[in-house]
Image: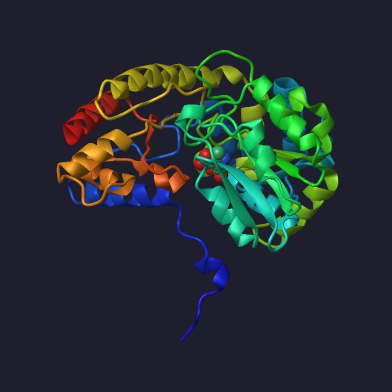
Amino acid sequence: ILELSTRVQAIKPSPTLAVNAQANKLKAEGKDIIGLGVGEPDFDTPQHIKDAGIAAINKGFTKYTAVGGTASLKQAIIAKFKRDNGLDYKPNQILVSCGGKQSFYNLTQATINKGDEVIIPAPFWVSYPDIVLLAEGVPVIVEAGIEQGFKMSAEQLAAAITPKTRMVVINSPSNPTGAVYTAAELTALGVVLRQHPHVLIASDDMYEHIRMDDTPFVNILNVCPDLYDRTLVLNGVSKAYAMTGWRIGYAAGRADIMAAMENIQSQSTSNPTSISQVAAEVALNGDQSCITPMLTAFRERHAYLVDALNAIPGLKCVPSGGAFYAFPDASAAITKLHAEGKLKEANDLALAERLLEFGVALVPGSAFGSEGCIRLSFATSMDNLKAAVARIAAALA
Ligand code: PLP
């Protein structure tokens, strides 16, 4: 019999995509399901960006490009880093990939050796640990619960670092919690990292533009510029410009690391799609006000949802700083429903199954390393959110 590799046996399919698939299956069977599982904006890609993609096709820009991205897209990314983040990069410090996911994949493949430790604060984006495992690294999970605003403290980081630590992941705003690190918190993490020059910093800024207030976005390099040589900044157009399907992400950092990542990419996917690169360039160089209507809607939904969830007994939801997710702690509801015999087991998976029976698809917190919570995406209409809240209230009553 064919044995699958130990590598692939160490990982699991993305649970968020699995919930989506399950919800779509039930919908196809005619069930009335409100999907709050998705991690993508419910808006269409702005028209001028779509037009740029169409024009690229019509002009015949449909062939291989440079593996690491076109020169003009790299210039647009360099300009974006300067404009939005005050960061300076040269073209050989930029790598364009097929989505932010590939950026992180390339990074781990290029820097992690077997047994190297990667510190990942939980709750985490589901893909970090599995992508680290694919690189034969060891995910070191640091629990950052609701009582600490879902953010890793400097003390926790210091305690997690060992001689084998190769990298720490900072994701702000966070998927799934929406937590945003303040300048002071990043400074404190930086103080710890300064003492450990062997540790790389992966700063995943994918949700940079989706924030619930107008405080300026801060990256660790803004407060600790001396960490420039070992910080890899990851970002992309997927979330800010509603471009998840176009598959364009990018990374910036030390030129030798970018060259190594490009090598990996050259032997796996080659260049990101040519036409998507043209669209991404227009997204980054074009009028940024196309983000505003999406942002306004996300903020309204967030304000509604946090209050509505907190009004349901058994749920505790803290307001988030960014991204488009609510991440309530549902442990009180789980304990109560289990005691009443309404849940097979006292865990978030059983709660998610019950919610699915009541017509709401969402992702249990354990998928993100945080048992007892649930993640609701508010990348859906206000009407859907209101109907979903009523169903959740009924399921938890
Ligand atoms: N980083 C975070 C925190 C995310 O939530 C996602 C998508 O869900 C990504 C990176 C990757 O985005 P993509 O590969 O779609 O560009």
Decide which of 164, 312 is in the foreground and name it.
164
Position of residue 155 in the picture relative to residue 72 (left or right): left
Q: Nearer the viewer, residue 83 or 203?
A: 203
Name the residue at 31% across, 22% down: 310
Specify how the rendered protein is coloured: rainbow
Position of 294 with respect to 194 (left or right) is left
* Residue that lies at the very extreme toward the bottom in this rendered image: 1
| Res. 351 image quadrant | top left
Q: What is the residue that sits farthest to the top in this orientation?
A: 214
- Give the image location of residue 319, x and y in percent: 44, 21
Left or right of 197? Residue 344 is: left
Residue 332 drawn at (x, y percent): 29, 34
On the question of residue 163 being in view, the answer is yes
- The quarter of the image that holds ligand 1 is top right
Disc tally is 0
Residue appearing at x 41%, y 46% in the figure: 366
Residue drawn 62% across the image and 50% down it: 102
Quadrant for the C terminus in the image? top left
Whether residue 99 is visible to the viewer of this picture, yes or no, is no
Q: Residue at x 48, y 34 (%)?
A: 145
- Camera-side residue of 141 and 202: 141
Residue 122, image x, y percentages: 52, 41
86 is higher (above) or lower (below) than 271: above
Of 305 and 236, nearer the camera is 305
Above/below status of 258 relative to 207: below
Q: Position of residue 275 (x, y in %)?
A: 61, 43
